[in-house]
Image (cartoon, rainbow, N blue to C red):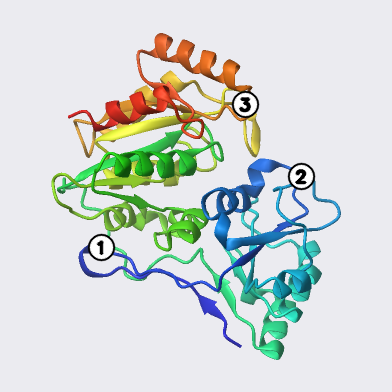
Amino acid sequence: MGTASASLRAGKEGETSRLALPQPYLLFLGDTVEAGFAKTAFGLRDWAPDLCVGEFALPSARIDLGLPKLSPAEAADRGARSLVIGVANSGGFIAESWVPALVEALEAGLDIVSGMHSKLIQVPELRYGAERLGRQLIDIRTPPANLPIATGLKRSGKRLLTVGTDCALGKKYTALSIARGFAGRGVDVDFRATGQTGIMISGGGIPMDAVVSDFAAGAAEVLSPAADPGHWDVIEGQGSILHPAYAGVSLALLHGSQPDVFVVCHDPGRTRLLGDEEFAVPSVEEIIDLTTHLGSRTNPKIRCGGVSLNTSALGSEEAADHCAAESARLGLPVCDPIRGGEAFDALIEECLRS
């Protein structure tokens, strides 16, 4: 059995090794009914479409990626080499109801790639099936070995961090869009992935929520090492600093990445925290103030570069009007990076402002 733990080791000057995953992919949606819990599948569809052969879901699923709906055997016939678990559920567990479908994928000749907290090899049916069929079980959510404790000391280069009012509302999409916007202006830039989907898209990074808490800020320092003064690292944010479940990784990223600029990501249609609906989503202003205050501990010059809104539920005209109104209210560039346009250009210019 070619079981694999696709961990990224810390290397020279904090660089991380690259991944070589069996591609292309069949995206598995399990029994997911909430789009926010299928963000891995959506991320791969949107940012690595050439790697996605189709989608595969259980009958009770209610999520549709708009890709060809294929069985594992059909996907293998179309050239797929692995099934990617496209679900990012609360707790990162592999549900028992998924196991027969995952075994079906192994029997069809596909390896399995997972970004879940639970390890594939811990599921007996998958372990035995992979051994019997000679397939790989590849776990992405494995941090590097020998991560250091953070120093908090300033290092060269420039950094931008995306932060959020909640989880699963666009921090990865915003970071990828900004990195692409920087590159389009001739800026020397790297996208730094901090979650399983970003790692699958970019081929490297550190799964921050799998790092032991004492080493999380140090992992952020490793992820964005000292660089040339004009180089930018655009760092994918995680969670929200005011989410009761995920604030720890958010604060570690903030202190360890020492951003010169941060961009707040927000879904204007969301009122309750995803996965913790007893709590209201905090305001953009509260996140700006708190991020500035806490981030100034390791970078006194930290500033907010603007706001990224997830306006996917709005029409184009309504989205543009809402972004313009929020920009006037906050005195900052506000845009939906996926829609682009002049508002996005204004955000890029503000972020790059010295």
Q: Are marks 3 and 2 in contact (CB under 8 Å)?
A: no
- Location of the N terminus (image quadrant): bottom right
In this rendering, position of residue 271 left or right of residue 14: right
Q: Is residue 133 above or below residue 211?
A: below
Q: Position of residue 216 (x, y in %)?
A: 37, 54
Q: Which residue is mark 2?
A: 33
- Amino acid type, callout 1: Gly
From this view, report whether residue 145 is shown above or below residue 344: below
Would residue 159 be visible to someone looking at this image? yes
**What crowding class fits label 3: few (fewer than 14 Cα within 10 Å), some (14-19), or many (20 or more)?**
some
The mark that comes first in sequence, 3 or 2, is: 2
Tell me which label, 1 or 3, sits earlier in the chain: 1
Packing grade of label 1 (10 A; few <14, some 14-19, many >=20) is some
Three-letter amino acid code of the residue under disc 3:
Arg
Q: Is residue 103 above or below residue 254?
A: below
- Would you say the residues marked 1 and 3 are in contact, meaning their CB atoms lie under 8 Å apart? no
Q: Give whichever of 183, 219 is nearer the camera.
A: 183
The residue labelled by disc 1 is: 14
Kind of residue indicated by mark 2: Val
Identify the residue shown where x is 31% and y is 68%. 10
Q: Nearer the viewer, residue 234 or 241?
A: 234
> Badge 3 is on which residue?
270
Residue 80 position within the rendered picture, expressed as x and y whole percent measured from the top left: 65, 71
Q: Real-space Cα distance between discs 3 and 2?
A: 17 Å
Q: Residues within 10 Å of mark 2 (few under 14, many from 20)?
A: some
Relative vertical location of residue 124 with respect to residue 333 in this rendering, above or below: below
Q: Nearer the viewer, residue 298 or 25?
A: 25
Please tell me which of labels 1 and 2 falls first in the chain: 1
Label 3's element?
loop
Which residue corresponds to the image point at 35% horizontal and 13% vertical from the top-left?
A: 331
